[in-house]
Amino acid sequence: MGIYLPIAEISVNILVLLAMGAAVGFLSGMFGVGGGFLITPLLIFYNIPPAIAVATGANQVIASSFSGALSHMKRGTLDFKLGGVLLAGGVVGSTFGIWVFALLRSLGQLDLFISLLYVVMLGTVGGLMLYESVNALRATRSGTAPTLKKSGQHNWIHRLPLKMRFRASKLFVSVIPVIGLGVAIGFLSSIMGVGGGFIMVPALIYLLRVPTNVVIGTSLFQIIFTSAYTTLVHASTNQTVDVMLAFLLMVGGVAGAQYGVKAGQRLRGEQLRALLALLVLAVALRLAVDLFATPPNLYSLSVPGMG
Amino acid sequence: MRPARLALLAMLALATAIPAARAQTPHEEGIQIGLSTDAVSITAGFSGADLTIFGALEDADPQIARQGRYDVVVVLEGPARPVVVRRKDRVLGVWINLESEQFENVPVSYSVASTRPFQDITQPDSYKQLSLGANNIYMQPGDPEAPPTTIAEFTKALRQRKTATGLYSENVGGVRFLSQNLFRATVRLAPDVPVGTHKARAFLFKNGVFVKESSAQLEIRKSGFEQAVFRLAHNHGFFYGFLSVSLAMLTGWMGRIVFRKD
Protein backbone atom coordinates (compact mmCIF):
# COMPACT_ATOMS: atom_id res chain seq x y z
CA MET A 1 0.00 0.00 0.00
CA GLY A 2 1.70 3.15 -1.17
CA ILE A 3 1.49 6.61 0.26
CA TYR A 4 2.95 9.78 -1.18
CA LEU A 5 4.99 11.84 1.24
CA PRO A 6 4.36 15.52 0.55
CA ILE A 7 7.73 16.85 1.76
CA ALA A 8 10.04 13.96 0.92
CA GLU A 9 8.23 13.90 -2.47
CA ILE A 10 8.45 10.17 -2.84
CA SER A 11 6.03 7.32 -2.61
CA VAL A 12 6.61 4.79 0.17
CA ASN A 13 4.90 1.73 1.56
CA ILE A 14 2.60 2.63 4.43
CA LEU A 15 2.86 -0.82 6.04
CA VAL A 16 6.65 -0.73 6.07
CA LEU A 17 6.56 2.60 7.91
CA LEU A 18 3.99 1.39 10.45
CA ALA A 19 6.02 -1.76 11.07
CA MET A 20 9.20 0.26 11.37
CA GLY A 21 7.53 2.54 13.91
CA ALA A 22 6.13 -0.42 15.83
CA ALA A 23 9.46 -2.26 15.97
CA VAL A 24 11.31 0.81 17.17
CA GLY A 25 8.47 1.64 19.58
CA PHE A 26 8.70 -1.87 21.01
CA LEU A 27 12.43 -1.51 21.61
CA SER A 28 12.08 1.99 23.01
CA GLY A 29 9.38 0.86 25.43
CA MET A 30 11.53 -2.07 26.44
CA PHE A 31 14.70 -0.07 27.05
CA GLY A 32 13.24 3.29 28.07
CA VAL A 33 14.85 5.30 25.28
CA GLY A 34 13.21 7.52 22.68
CA GLY A 35 14.28 5.39 19.73
CA GLY A 36 15.40 8.27 17.53
CA PHE A 37 18.82 6.67 17.13
CA LEU A 38 17.11 3.70 15.46
CA ILE A 39 14.46 5.54 13.44
CA THR A 40 16.78 7.92 11.63
CA PRO A 41 19.21 5.25 10.32
CA LEU A 42 16.27 3.00 9.41
CA LEU A 43 14.70 5.80 7.38
CA ILE A 44 18.02 6.42 5.65
CA PHE A 45 18.29 2.69 4.81
CA TYR A 46 14.77 3.02 3.38
CA ASN A 47 15.98 5.72 0.96
CA ILE A 48 14.46 8.70 2.70
CA PRO A 49 16.86 11.62 2.12
CA PRO A 50 19.02 11.97 5.27
CA ALA A 51 18.07 15.62 5.81
CA ILE A 52 14.40 14.66 5.97
CA ALA A 53 15.06 11.53 8.03
CA VAL A 54 16.83 13.61 10.68
CA ALA A 55 14.21 16.36 10.98
CA THR A 56 11.31 13.91 10.87
CA GLY A 57 13.02 11.63 13.38
CA ALA A 58 13.12 14.55 15.82
CA ASN A 59 9.41 15.10 15.30
CA GLN A 60 8.65 11.42 15.91
CA VAL A 61 10.65 11.37 19.14
CA ILE A 62 8.31 14.00 20.65
CA ALA A 63 5.37 11.60 20.60
CA SER A 64 7.10 8.75 22.41
CA SER A 65 8.85 10.95 24.96
CA PHE A 66 5.68 12.94 25.68
CA SER A 67 3.79 9.73 26.29
CA GLY A 68 6.56 8.48 28.61
CA ALA A 69 7.00 11.77 30.46
CA LEU A 70 3.27 11.89 31.26
CA SER A 71 3.44 8.64 33.18
CA HIS A 72 6.59 9.72 35.02
CA MET A 73 4.95 13.00 35.97
CA LYS A 74 2.07 11.07 37.48
CA ARG A 75 4.49 8.98 39.54
CA GLY A 76 6.40 12.07 40.64
CA THR A 77 9.67 10.87 39.14
CA LEU A 78 10.29 14.01 37.12
CA ASP A 79 12.62 16.81 38.26
CA PHE A 80 11.24 19.93 36.54
CA LYS A 81 14.03 22.19 37.78
CA LEU A 82 16.82 19.91 36.57
CA GLY A 83 14.96 19.41 33.30
CA GLY A 84 14.59 23.16 32.91
CA VAL A 85 18.32 23.84 33.31
CA LEU A 86 19.18 21.04 30.88
CA LEU A 87 16.68 22.58 28.51
CA ALA A 88 18.29 26.02 28.63
CA GLY A 89 21.51 24.42 27.44
CA GLY A 90 19.57 22.31 24.93
CA VAL A 91 18.18 25.36 23.13
CA VAL A 92 21.68 26.80 22.67
CA GLY A 93 23.01 23.44 21.43
CA SER A 94 20.13 22.93 18.97
CA THR A 95 20.48 26.37 17.47
CA PHE A 96 24.18 25.81 16.89
CA GLY A 97 23.50 22.29 15.56
CA ILE A 98 20.98 23.51 13.01
CA TRP A 99 23.39 26.12 11.77
CA VAL A 100 26.05 23.41 11.30
CA PHE A 101 23.43 21.20 9.64
CA ALA A 102 22.60 23.84 7.01
CA LEU A 103 26.28 24.54 6.42
CA LEU A 104 27.18 20.87 5.90
CA ARG A 105 24.21 20.42 3.62
CA SER A 106 25.35 23.20 1.34
CA LEU A 107 28.85 21.68 1.29
CA GLY A 108 27.47 18.25 0.34
CA GLN A 109 29.00 16.62 3.42
CA LEU A 110 25.85 16.28 5.52
CA ASP A 111 25.31 12.57 4.87
CA LEU A 112 28.90 11.77 5.72
CA PHE A 113 28.82 13.83 8.91
CA ILE A 114 25.56 12.25 10.09
CA SER A 115 26.93 8.77 9.47
CA LEU A 116 30.25 9.50 11.16
CA LEU A 117 28.55 11.02 14.18
CA TYR A 118 26.27 8.00 14.45
CA VAL A 119 29.12 5.54 14.21
CA VAL A 120 31.21 7.35 16.81
CA MET A 121 28.40 8.08 19.28
CA LEU A 122 26.66 4.73 19.01
CA GLY A 123 29.94 2.83 19.00
CA THR A 124 31.16 4.59 22.15
CA VAL A 125 27.91 4.42 24.10
CA GLY A 126 27.19 0.85 23.00
CA GLY A 127 30.71 -0.28 23.86
CA LEU A 128 30.69 1.29 27.32
CA MET A 129 27.24 -0.04 28.08
CA LEU A 130 28.15 -3.55 26.97
CA TYR A 131 31.30 -3.50 29.09
CA GLU A 132 29.37 -2.30 32.15
CA SER A 133 26.46 -4.70 31.77
CA VAL A 134 28.61 -7.75 31.08
CA ASN A 135 30.56 -6.97 34.26
CA ALA A 136 27.30 -6.66 36.18
CA LEU A 137 26.02 -9.95 34.73
CA ARG A 138 29.26 -11.67 35.74
CA ALA A 139 29.07 -10.19 39.22
CA THR A 140 25.52 -11.45 39.80
CA ARG A 141 26.46 -14.87 38.49
CA SER A 142 29.44 -15.19 40.86
CA GLY A 143 27.21 -14.13 43.74
CA THR A 144 28.71 -10.76 44.66
CA ALA A 145 26.26 -7.86 44.82
CA PRO A 146 26.76 -5.26 42.07
CA THR A 147 28.88 -2.45 43.47
CA LEU A 148 27.51 0.79 42.13
CA LYS A 149 29.44 3.70 43.54
CA LYS A 150 27.81 5.35 46.52
CA SER A 151 26.07 8.61 45.71
CA GLY A 152 27.98 10.21 48.61
CA GLN A 153 31.24 9.94 46.70
CA HIS A 154 32.19 13.09 44.81
CA ASN A 155 34.22 13.59 41.69
CA TRP A 156 35.66 16.69 40.04
CA ILE A 157 32.26 17.69 38.68
CA HIS A 158 30.99 18.24 42.19
CA ARG A 159 33.77 20.73 42.96
CA LEU A 160 32.75 23.23 40.26
CA PRO A 161 31.29 26.62 41.29
CA LEU A 162 27.73 28.02 40.74
CA LYS A 163 26.01 25.31 42.74
CA MET A 164 22.28 24.86 42.60
CA ARG A 165 19.91 22.69 44.61
CA PHE A 166 17.63 20.22 42.81
CA ARG A 167 15.18 18.95 45.40
CA ALA A 168 13.41 16.21 43.46
CA SER A 169 16.79 14.69 42.56
CA LYS A 170 18.25 15.25 46.06
CA LEU A 171 21.15 16.95 44.36
CA PHE A 172 23.35 19.99 45.09
CA VAL A 173 25.55 20.48 42.07
CA SER A 174 27.14 23.13 39.84
CA VAL A 175 24.97 24.23 36.90
CA ILE A 176 27.97 24.24 34.53
CA PRO A 177 28.00 20.47 33.77
CA VAL A 178 24.19 20.42 33.64
CA ILE A 179 24.06 23.19 31.05
CA GLY A 180 27.02 21.66 29.21
CA LEU A 181 25.22 18.34 28.99
CA GLY A 182 22.12 20.16 27.74
CA VAL A 183 24.12 21.89 25.00
CA ALA A 184 25.69 18.60 23.87
CA ILE A 185 22.32 16.83 23.75
CA GLY A 186 20.72 19.73 21.88
CA PHE A 187 23.51 19.71 19.30
CA LEU A 188 23.23 15.96 18.74
CA SER A 189 19.46 16.17 18.62
CA SER A 190 19.46 18.64 15.75
CA ILE A 191 22.17 16.91 13.73
CA MET A 192 21.29 13.27 14.37
CA GLY A 193 17.52 13.55 14.75
CA VAL A 194 17.70 11.84 18.12
CA GLY A 195 16.30 12.82 21.48
CA GLY A 196 19.61 11.96 23.07
CA GLY A 197 18.23 9.68 25.77
CA PHE A 198 20.89 7.08 25.12
CA ILE A 199 23.54 9.67 26.09
CA MET A 200 21.53 11.62 28.64
CA VAL A 201 20.57 8.66 30.82
CA PRO A 202 24.10 7.33 31.43
CA ALA A 203 25.47 10.88 31.80
CA LEU A 204 22.92 11.80 34.47
CA ILE A 205 23.50 8.56 36.35
CA TYR A 206 27.26 8.28 36.18
CA LEU A 207 28.39 11.93 35.96
CA LEU A 208 25.82 13.86 37.96
CA ARG A 209 24.73 10.99 40.26
CA VAL A 210 21.03 11.68 39.78
CA PRO A 211 18.92 8.89 41.35
CA THR A 212 18.03 6.37 38.63
CA ASN A 213 14.27 6.57 39.17
CA VAL A 214 14.29 10.33 38.45
CA VAL A 215 16.66 10.07 35.48
CA ILE A 216 14.34 8.60 32.87
CA GLY A 217 11.43 10.92 33.61
CA THR A 218 13.64 14.01 33.62
CA SER A 219 15.48 12.94 30.50
CA LEU A 220 12.18 12.35 28.69
CA PHE A 221 10.89 15.74 29.86
CA GLN A 222 13.83 17.64 28.45
CA ILE A 223 13.87 15.52 25.27
CA ILE A 224 10.30 16.63 24.50
CA PHE A 225 11.39 20.24 24.45
CA THR A 226 14.75 19.76 22.75
CA SER A 227 13.21 17.74 19.94
CA ALA A 228 10.21 20.07 19.72
CA TYR A 229 12.58 22.99 19.37
CA THR A 230 14.67 21.06 16.81
CA THR A 231 11.53 20.23 14.84
CA LEU A 232 10.43 23.87 14.85
CA VAL A 233 13.78 25.19 13.69
CA HIS A 234 14.21 22.48 11.02
CA ALA A 235 10.69 23.19 9.81
CA SER A 236 11.25 26.93 9.54
CA THR A 237 14.82 26.98 8.18
CA ASN A 238 15.27 23.76 6.20
CA GLN A 239 11.66 22.69 5.45
CA THR A 240 12.65 19.10 6.01
CA VAL A 241 9.97 17.87 8.44
CA ASP A 242 7.58 15.47 6.73
CA VAL A 243 4.53 15.42 8.96
CA MET A 244 2.94 12.50 7.10
CA LEU A 245 6.03 10.35 7.56
CA ALA A 246 6.35 11.36 11.22
CA PHE A 247 2.71 10.60 11.92
CA LEU A 248 2.89 7.06 10.49
CA LEU A 249 5.99 6.35 12.55
CA MET A 250 4.37 7.76 15.69
CA VAL A 251 1.24 5.66 15.35
CA GLY A 252 3.31 2.51 14.96
CA GLY A 253 5.68 3.63 17.69
CA VAL A 254 3.10 4.46 20.34
CA ALA A 255 1.41 1.09 19.85
CA GLY A 256 4.67 -0.84 19.81
CA ALA A 257 5.95 0.89 22.94
CA GLN A 258 3.14 -0.49 25.10
CA TYR A 259 4.14 -4.08 24.31
CA GLY A 260 7.80 -3.22 24.67
CA VAL A 261 7.25 -2.03 28.25
CA LYS A 262 5.60 -5.35 29.12
CA ALA A 263 8.43 -7.34 27.54
CA GLY A 264 10.99 -5.20 29.34
CA GLN A 265 9.48 -5.94 32.73
CA ARG A 266 10.28 -9.64 32.33
CA LEU A 267 14.02 -9.00 31.95
CA ARG A 268 16.54 -7.93 34.57
CA GLY A 269 18.18 -4.51 34.41
CA GLU A 270 21.65 -5.67 33.40
CA GLN A 271 20.25 -8.09 30.82
CA LEU A 272 18.26 -5.23 29.32
CA ARG A 273 21.32 -3.01 29.22
CA ALA A 274 23.41 -5.73 27.57
CA LEU A 275 20.76 -6.26 24.89
CA LEU A 276 20.40 -2.53 24.27
CA ALA A 277 24.20 -2.28 24.01
CA LEU A 278 24.26 -5.03 21.38
CA LEU A 279 21.50 -3.31 19.44
CA VAL A 280 23.29 0.03 19.53
CA LEU A 281 26.53 -1.61 18.40
CA ALA A 282 24.74 -3.40 15.57
CA VAL A 283 23.38 -0.11 14.20
CA ALA A 284 26.82 1.48 14.52
CA LEU A 285 28.41 -1.43 12.69
CA ARG A 286 25.88 -1.32 9.88
CA LEU A 287 26.53 2.40 9.36
CA ALA A 288 30.27 1.88 9.56
CA VAL A 289 30.13 -0.75 6.82
CA ASP A 290 28.42 1.81 4.57
CA LEU A 291 31.18 4.31 5.18
CA PHE A 292 33.97 1.93 4.24
CA ALA A 293 32.40 -0.35 1.66
CA THR A 294 32.55 0.72 -1.98
CA PRO A 295 29.23 2.46 -2.64
CA PRO A 296 27.09 1.08 -5.49
CA ASN A 297 26.90 4.60 -6.93
CA LEU A 298 29.90 6.85 -6.80
CA TYR A 299 27.86 9.75 -8.12
CA SER A 300 24.96 11.47 -6.46
CA LEU A 301 22.68 14.31 -7.49
CA SER A 302 21.45 17.13 -5.34
CA VAL A 303 19.84 20.51 -5.63
CA PRO A 304 22.40 23.29 -5.23
CA GLY A 305 22.22 25.92 -2.56
CA MET A 306 19.80 24.11 -0.29
CA GLY A 307 20.05 24.73 3.39
CA MET B 1 23.16 -4.60 -42.55
CA ARG B 2 23.68 -0.89 -42.13
CA PRO B 3 24.48 -0.02 -45.77
CA ALA B 4 21.52 -2.16 -46.80
CA ARG B 5 19.21 -0.19 -44.57
CA LEU B 6 20.62 3.10 -45.82
CA ALA B 7 20.07 2.01 -49.36
CA LEU B 8 16.52 1.05 -48.54
CA LEU B 9 15.92 4.40 -46.89
CA ALA B 10 17.36 6.17 -49.88
CA MET B 11 15.08 4.23 -52.19
CA LEU B 12 12.09 4.99 -50.02
CA ALA B 13 13.00 8.64 -49.93
CA LEU B 14 13.28 8.65 -53.68
CA ALA B 15 10.00 6.85 -54.07
CA THR B 16 8.18 9.40 -51.96
CA ALA B 17 9.99 12.38 -53.43
CA ILE B 18 8.67 11.70 -56.91
CA PRO B 19 4.95 11.86 -56.12
CA ALA B 20 5.57 14.90 -53.91
CA ALA B 21 7.35 16.70 -56.70
CA ARG B 22 4.63 15.74 -59.14
CA ALA B 23 1.98 17.27 -56.90
CA GLN B 24 3.40 20.75 -57.52
CA THR B 25 2.62 22.04 -54.01
CA PRO B 26 4.96 20.22 -51.60
CA HIS B 27 3.05 17.85 -49.44
CA GLU B 28 3.40 19.03 -45.85
CA GLU B 29 2.15 16.86 -43.01
CA GLY B 30 1.29 18.24 -39.62
CA ILE B 31 1.03 16.77 -36.18
CA GLN B 32 -1.18 17.66 -33.27
CA ILE B 33 -1.34 16.32 -29.75
CA GLY B 34 -3.97 16.68 -27.13
CA LEU B 35 -3.98 15.92 -23.45
CA SER B 36 -7.12 14.68 -21.81
CA THR B 37 -6.34 17.03 -18.96
CA ASP B 38 -4.03 19.98 -18.57
CA ALA B 39 -3.21 19.08 -14.98
CA VAL B 40 -2.28 15.85 -13.24
CA SER B 41 -2.75 15.64 -9.49
CA ILE B 42 -0.50 13.59 -7.29
CA THR B 43 -2.62 12.11 -4.53
CA ALA B 44 -1.65 10.22 -1.38
CA GLY B 45 -1.76 6.91 -3.24
CA PHE B 46 0.48 8.04 -6.10
CA SER B 47 3.23 5.58 -6.97
CA GLY B 48 4.06 6.54 -10.50
CA ALA B 49 1.64 6.41 -13.41
CA ASP B 50 1.34 6.07 -17.15
CA LEU B 51 0.26 9.20 -18.93
CA THR B 52 -1.57 8.76 -22.20
CA ILE B 53 -1.26 11.41 -24.87
CA PHE B 54 -3.41 11.30 -28.00
CA GLY B 55 -2.36 12.82 -31.23
CA ALA B 56 -3.20 13.02 -34.89
CA LEU B 57 -1.36 13.47 -38.16
CA GLU B 58 -2.70 16.14 -40.47
CA ASP B 59 -2.69 15.69 -44.22
CA ALA B 60 -1.01 12.34 -43.87
CA ASP B 61 -0.34 10.46 -47.06
CA PRO B 62 -2.49 7.32 -46.76
CA GLN B 63 -0.01 5.26 -48.74
CA ILE B 64 2.92 6.13 -46.51
CA ALA B 65 0.80 5.60 -43.43
CA ARG B 66 -0.24 2.16 -44.67
CA GLN B 67 3.37 1.21 -45.18
CA GLY B 68 4.16 2.38 -41.65
CA ARG B 69 6.72 4.91 -42.74
CA TYR B 70 5.53 7.62 -40.39
CA ASP B 71 7.26 7.60 -37.03
CA VAL B 72 6.33 9.56 -33.97
CA VAL B 73 8.46 10.30 -30.92
CA VAL B 74 6.71 11.82 -27.91
CA VAL B 75 8.62 13.44 -25.06
CA LEU B 76 7.37 14.58 -21.69
CA GLU B 77 9.94 16.93 -20.26
CA GLY B 78 9.87 18.10 -16.65
CA PRO B 79 10.75 21.58 -15.44
CA ALA B 80 14.42 22.53 -15.72
CA ARG B 81 16.34 23.06 -12.54
CA PRO B 82 19.99 23.38 -11.60
CA VAL B 83 21.60 20.23 -10.25
CA VAL B 84 24.86 19.37 -8.53
CA VAL B 85 26.58 16.09 -9.35
CA ARG B 86 28.99 14.88 -6.70
CA ARG B 87 31.54 12.13 -6.91
CA LYS B 88 32.62 10.05 -3.93
CA ASP B 89 36.28 9.25 -3.52
CA ARG B 90 38.09 7.24 -0.94
CA VAL B 91 39.91 9.24 1.72
CA LEU B 92 41.60 7.22 4.49
CA GLY B 93 39.29 4.32 3.69
CA VAL B 94 36.12 6.40 3.99
CA TRP B 95 34.03 7.37 0.97
CA ILE B 96 33.63 11.13 0.88
CA ASN B 97 31.95 13.48 -1.59
CA LEU B 98 34.93 15.25 -3.08
CA GLU B 99 34.54 16.62 -6.58
CA SER B 100 31.35 18.17 -7.80
CA GLU B 101 30.06 19.87 -10.90
CA GLN B 102 26.97 22.05 -11.22
CA PHE B 103 24.71 22.05 -14.26
CA GLU B 104 22.12 24.68 -15.09
CA ASN B 105 18.67 24.00 -16.49
CA VAL B 106 18.63 20.24 -16.40
CA PRO B 107 15.15 18.79 -16.96
CA VAL B 108 14.22 17.03 -13.73
CA SER B 109 12.42 14.32 -15.66
CA TYR B 110 12.46 13.22 -19.28
CA SER B 111 10.24 10.42 -20.58
CA VAL B 112 10.32 9.39 -24.21
CA ALA B 113 7.99 7.12 -26.13
CA SER B 114 8.46 6.13 -29.74
CA THR B 115 6.88 4.00 -32.42
CA ARG B 116 10.03 1.98 -33.08
CA PRO B 117 13.55 1.62 -31.65
CA PHE B 118 15.32 4.95 -31.89
CA GLN B 119 18.10 3.81 -34.19
CA ASP B 120 15.48 2.66 -36.70
CA ILE B 121 13.64 5.98 -36.91
CA THR B 122 16.33 8.40 -38.00
CA GLN B 123 20.04 9.16 -37.89
CA PRO B 124 21.87 9.99 -34.63
CA ASP B 125 22.73 13.39 -36.14
CA SER B 126 19.15 14.47 -36.53
CA TYR B 127 18.40 13.45 -32.92
CA LYS B 128 21.29 15.66 -31.93
CA GLN B 129 20.02 18.56 -34.02
CA LEU B 130 16.61 18.27 -32.43
CA SER B 131 18.10 17.74 -28.91
CA LEU B 132 15.83 14.75 -28.82
CA GLY B 133 16.44 11.88 -26.39
CA ALA B 134 17.97 11.79 -22.94
CA ASN B 135 21.45 11.46 -24.41
CA ASN B 136 21.08 14.51 -26.60
CA ILE B 137 19.80 17.10 -24.16
CA TYR B 138 22.39 19.76 -23.68
CA MET B 139 23.47 19.99 -20.06
CA GLN B 140 24.91 23.43 -19.52
CA PRO B 141 27.78 23.29 -17.03
CA GLY B 142 27.70 25.94 -14.32
CA ASP B 143 31.44 26.39 -14.56
CA PRO B 144 32.40 26.77 -18.24
CA GLU B 145 36.09 26.86 -17.28
CA ALA B 146 36.04 23.25 -16.07
CA PRO B 147 38.09 20.79 -18.16
CA PRO B 148 35.98 19.16 -20.90
CA THR B 149 36.84 15.63 -19.74
CA THR B 150 35.50 16.40 -16.26
CA ILE B 151 32.32 17.87 -17.72
CA ALA B 152 31.88 14.85 -19.98
CA GLU B 153 32.36 12.51 -17.05
CA PHE B 154 29.84 14.30 -14.83
CA THR B 155 27.34 14.73 -17.65
CA LYS B 156 27.44 11.00 -18.25
CA ALA B 157 27.02 10.30 -14.54
CA LEU B 158 24.09 12.73 -14.39
CA ARG B 159 22.29 10.89 -17.20
CA GLN B 160 23.04 7.52 -15.65
CA ARG B 161 21.68 8.53 -12.25
CA LYS B 162 18.55 10.01 -13.80
CA THR B 163 17.97 6.85 -15.81
CA ALA B 164 18.65 4.60 -12.82
CA THR B 165 16.09 6.45 -10.70
CA GLY B 166 13.49 6.22 -13.46
CA LEU B 167 13.25 9.98 -13.97
CA TYR B 168 14.67 9.59 -17.46
CA SER B 169 12.92 6.78 -19.26
CA GLU B 170 12.43 5.39 -22.71
CA ASN B 171 9.38 3.50 -23.88
CA VAL B 172 10.09 1.95 -27.25
CA GLY B 173 6.79 0.99 -28.84
CA GLY B 174 5.01 3.38 -26.50
CA VAL B 175 3.52 5.20 -29.46
CA ARG B 176 0.88 3.22 -31.36
CA PHE B 177 -1.10 4.19 -34.41
CA LEU B 178 -4.78 3.57 -33.77
CA SER B 179 -5.72 4.43 -37.34
CA GLN B 180 -3.90 5.98 -40.26
CA ASN B 181 -3.98 9.39 -38.63
CA LEU B 182 -4.56 8.80 -34.99
CA PHE B 183 -1.90 7.73 -32.49
CA ARG B 184 -1.67 7.15 -28.80
CA ALA B 185 1.52 7.64 -26.74
CA THR B 186 2.16 6.27 -23.28
CA VAL B 187 4.85 7.98 -21.22
CA ARG B 188 5.92 6.93 -17.79
CA LEU B 189 5.62 9.23 -14.78
CA ALA B 190 8.13 8.18 -12.11
CA PRO B 191 6.94 7.93 -8.48
CA ASP B 192 9.05 10.97 -7.66
CA VAL B 193 8.03 12.94 -10.75
CA PRO B 194 8.65 16.61 -9.99
CA VAL B 195 5.75 18.98 -9.64
CA GLY B 196 5.62 21.94 -11.98
CA THR B 197 4.98 22.67 -15.63
CA HIS B 198 5.86 19.78 -17.92
CA LYS B 199 6.09 20.08 -21.65
CA ALA B 200 4.79 17.36 -23.93
CA ARG B 201 6.27 17.42 -27.41
CA ALA B 202 5.60 15.19 -30.38
CA PHE B 203 8.04 14.82 -33.28
CA LEU B 204 6.90 13.49 -36.61
CA PHE B 205 9.31 11.69 -38.90
CA LYS B 206 8.55 10.62 -42.44
CA ASN B 207 10.89 8.08 -43.97
CA GLY B 208 13.48 8.93 -41.37
CA VAL B 209 13.30 12.67 -41.98
CA PHE B 210 12.03 15.08 -39.38
CA VAL B 211 8.86 16.82 -40.54
CA LYS B 212 7.16 18.70 -37.78
CA GLU B 213 6.84 19.17 -34.08
CA SER B 214 3.94 20.04 -31.84
CA SER B 215 3.78 20.69 -28.13
CA ALA B 216 1.38 21.01 -25.24
CA GLN B 217 1.76 21.90 -21.61
CA LEU B 218 0.90 19.80 -18.63
CA GLU B 219 0.81 20.92 -15.03
CA ILE B 220 1.77 18.27 -12.49
CA ARG B 221 0.83 19.22 -8.99
CA LYS B 222 0.16 17.67 -5.66
CA SER B 223 -3.49 17.12 -4.92
CA GLY B 224 -5.38 19.20 -2.40
CA PHE B 225 -4.08 17.80 0.87
CA GLU B 226 -0.50 17.09 -0.20
CA GLN B 227 -0.29 20.49 -1.85
CA ALA B 228 -1.64 22.21 1.24
CA VAL B 229 0.93 20.46 3.43
CA PHE B 230 3.75 21.28 1.05
CA ARG B 231 2.73 24.92 0.74
CA LEU B 232 2.31 25.32 4.45
CA ALA B 233 5.73 23.79 5.09
CA HIS B 234 7.41 26.12 2.64
CA ASN B 235 5.52 29.36 3.21
CA HIS B 236 4.78 29.15 6.90
CA GLY B 237 7.58 26.92 8.16
CA PHE B 238 7.30 27.95 11.78
CA PHE B 239 3.56 27.41 11.98
CA TYR B 240 3.96 24.08 10.18
CA GLY B 241 6.61 23.04 12.70
CA PHE B 242 4.29 24.08 15.51
CA LEU B 243 1.51 21.92 14.06
CA SER B 244 3.90 18.96 13.67
CA VAL B 245 4.93 19.28 17.31
CA SER B 246 1.30 19.52 18.46
CA LEU B 247 0.37 16.48 16.40
CA ALA B 248 3.23 14.52 17.96
CA MET B 249 2.14 15.47 21.48
CA LEU B 250 -1.47 14.65 20.71
CA THR B 251 -0.46 11.25 19.34
CA GLY B 252 1.65 10.53 22.42
CA TRP B 253 -1.20 11.53 24.71
CA MET B 254 -3.78 9.53 22.75
CA GLY B 255 -1.48 6.55 22.85
CA ARG B 256 -1.45 6.70 26.62
CA ILE B 257 -5.22 6.89 26.83
CA VAL B 258 -5.79 4.05 24.38
CA PHE B 259 -3.25 1.68 25.91
CA ARG B 260 -3.40 2.73 29.54
CA LYS B 261 -3.70 -0.06 32.04
CA ASP B 262 -3.02 1.76 35.32
Image: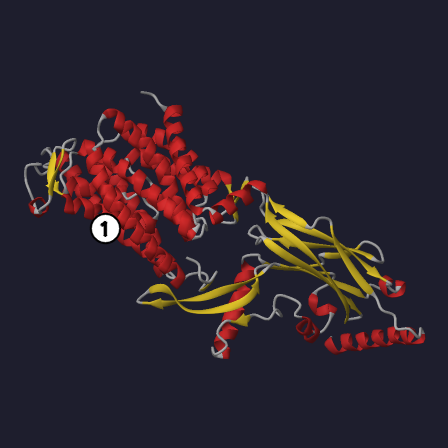
Give the residue at x 24% y 49%: A184
- Along the line of sight, the residue nearer the viewer: A90 or A220: A90
Q: Is residue B208 left or right of residue B254?
A: right
Task: Name the residue at 86% across, 62% down.
Answer: B66
Q: Position of residue A5 (x, y in %)?
A: 51, 45
Q: Is residue A264 above or below residue B56?
A: above
Q: Is residue A118 visible?
A: no
Pick whichever, A183 or A58, lies toward us: A183
Residue for point 70% across, 64% down = B117
SS under mark 1: helix
Image point (56%, 65%), residue name: B106
Residue A126 x/y as whole percent: 25, 46
Residue B87 x %, y %: 43, 67
Note whether B214 is above or below B231 in the view shown: below
Q: Quickly name the residue at label 1.
A: A124
Subunit bearing disc 1: A
Residue B140 seen from this side: yes
Q: How many marks?
A: 1
In the image shown, does B28 or B6 lie closer to the viewer? B28
**Quadrant the N terminus of chain B occupies:** bottom right
Res. B174 image quadrant: bottom right
Q: Position of residue B39 (x, y in %)?
A: 66, 49
Q: Label 1 amino acid?
A: Thr
Q: Is residue B173 or residue A9 the one in the foreground?
A: A9
